[in-house]
Image (tube, rainbow, N blue to C red):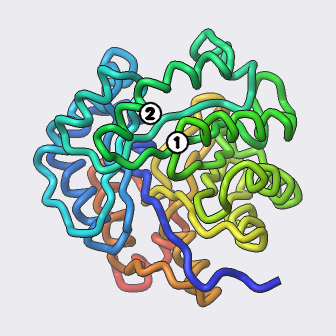
Amino acid sequence: MSLPRKVKMVEVGPRDGLQNEQQTIGAGVKIELVERLAAAGFPNVEAAAFVSPKWVPQMATSGDVMRDIKRRPGVVYSALVPNLKGFEAALAGDVDEVVIFGAASEAFSQKNINCSIAESIERFREVAEAAKRHRKRLRAAVSCAFGCPYQGEVPLAAVADVVRRLRELGCDEIDIADTIGVATPDKVRPVMETAMREFPIEGLSGHFHDTYGQALANIYASLEAGITIFHSSVAGLGGCPYAKGATGNVASEDVLYMMQGLGIDTGIDLDAVVDAGQFISAQLGRKSASRAGNAMAARRGG
């Protein structure tokens, strides 16, 4: 089966990656990271989350970040928005794309937000309507599409149901996420094919975590299935709070190295992303989690 010639990469490090950090990261560092990633050629950077600072203190500076970044023409700057209050803050921050979320696992939904999948998605209806009213792109994430830390296996019918519900809210793009990184390539195709029956394939994306070292293999399996949008996090930023020792998001440098080797066009400068990964890792005081990034940095002497 032939692979796509071109893919779109969505960089989630500044939001999905940094939100799990325990140490305080200043707005200036986040702004520089977002600007470096946009300059490297990412067409979409998930830059912020307008959530309660009580629950996600690391995202408390999201308004400052969105206000002060130097925007590059053509780049979509996204923010996670859980409710209408968050949407109003995102609107004030001139966010290009609003991100909402729903789980494919009932157990996950009940444990994390104390309501059913259907109820959780219904809560986003007013956010979705507001996004459309203000002509903002609307993206949704389907978490635990490949497995759940509480119930284990997630039925394909549950994935289909949540994708259908999100489609009905008017989403422009839907992320199929392996939140705890338990997927293997043989599980990828049936899940993606299930999603494709409910939503146009060109609007589906793969969001894989590398907890068990399977993310690149799962991305390759997604490419074989025809998926052309993928999420990644510079330097492998992020972690999964439900799996001890999890490395979390797949590293952007590793995905880009693989795409380059496959001859798939991303429009992104890998060397610039390596620099961004080394920059944020130095700020955090630890080594990057990207194997490709570290190897390339070592080869050129730092």
Secondary structure found at label 1 = loop
What residue is disc 2 on?
128
Left or right: where 51 falls relative to 20: left
Labels 2 and 1 touching (C-beta < 8 A):
yes
Q: CA distance from mark 2 to mark 1?
A: 7 Å
Crowd rating for badge 1 (residues with CA inside 10 Å; few <14, some 14–19, many 20+) = some
Q: Tell me which residue sits at (58%, 48%) in the image.
A: 174
Residue 49 quadrant: top left
Q: Say which label, 2 or 1, has the lower sequence index.
A: 2
Q: Tell me which residue sits at (78%, 53%) in the image.
A: 197
Task: Give the image location of residue 163, x and y in percent.
Answer: 68, 41
Left or right: where 33 falls relative to 157: left
Q: Is residue 210 above or below residue 126?
A: below
Task: Give the image location of residue 78, x and y in percent.
Answer: 35, 48
Task: Give the image location of residue 277, x and y in percent.
Answer: 37, 63
Crowd rating for badge 2 (residues with CA inside 10 Å; few <14, some 14–19, many 20+) = many
What residue is disc 1 on?
170
Q: Is residue 205 or residue 263 the one in the foreground?
A: 205
Q: Is residue 81 above or below residue 211?
A: above
Q: Residue furthest bottom?
A: 263
